[in-house]
């Protein structure tokens, strides 16, 4: 239990620090490269034979279901941690700051949903 709290705290601090730094710098996360393009770049950089490409694609296809299951399993824990972090931050803000924070978080939720939809396509 103590180890899990330490991990959660470290994760929260890391996530929050990265989010705040990105927000203050005015940057957004780049969109992930689409899977076909990433695989093509990967295959080309390794000069894979057609047999190797086929075998590796089969491995990746088989693992895709496991990755989706893992995301589905862990996503609620990350979401709960994010909500807990947001609540702690909101509690120390003024009413005006909290309203701006909520608006900002709503926009972040839209971007997060887009990223998740893209991940689910892969």
Image (spheres, grey):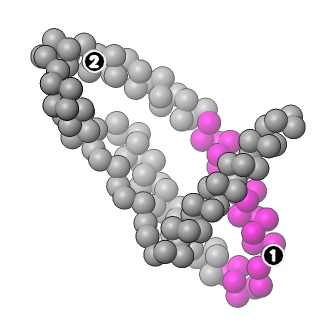
Q: Please give the range of residues in magenta.
A: 74-99
Residue nearer the viewer, 80 or 32: 32
| Residue 25 left/right relative to 85 | left
Residue count near mark 1 (Cα–Cα under 10 Å), binned few <14, some 14–19, many ≥20 = few
Give me the residue at 68% from left, 42% from top: 77
Residue nearer the viewer, 100 or 2: 2
x, y percent for residue 101: 64, 76
Image quadrant in which the N terminus is located: top right
Residue nearer the viewer, 33 or 105: 33
Look at the image and say whether residue 95 sits in the magenta stretch. yes
Question: Mark 2 sits on what residue?
Answer: 56
Q: Which mark is residue 76?
A: none
x, y percent for residue 6: 80, 43
Look at the image and say whether residue 30 sits in the magenta stretch. no
Task: Name the magenta segment's main secondary structure.
Answer: helix
Q: Would you say residue 36 is visible in this rendering?
A: no
x, y percent for residue 76: 65, 42
């Amino acid at each position: 239990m103590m180890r899990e709290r330490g991990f959660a705290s470290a994760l929260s601090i890391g996530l929050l620090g990265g989010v705040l730094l990105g927000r203050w710098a005015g940057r957004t996360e780049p969109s992930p490269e689409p899977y076909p393009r990433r695989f093509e770049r990967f295959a080309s950089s390794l000069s894979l034979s057609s047999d190797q490409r086929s075998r590796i694609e089969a491995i990746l296809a088989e693992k895709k279901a496991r990755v989706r299951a893992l995301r589905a399993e862990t996503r609620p824990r990350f979401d709960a941690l994010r909500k807990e972090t947001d609540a702690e931050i909101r509690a120390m803000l003024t009413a005006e700051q909290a309203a701006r924070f909520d608006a900002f978080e709503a926009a972040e939720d839209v971007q997060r949903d887009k990223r998740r939809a893209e991940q689910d396509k892969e």
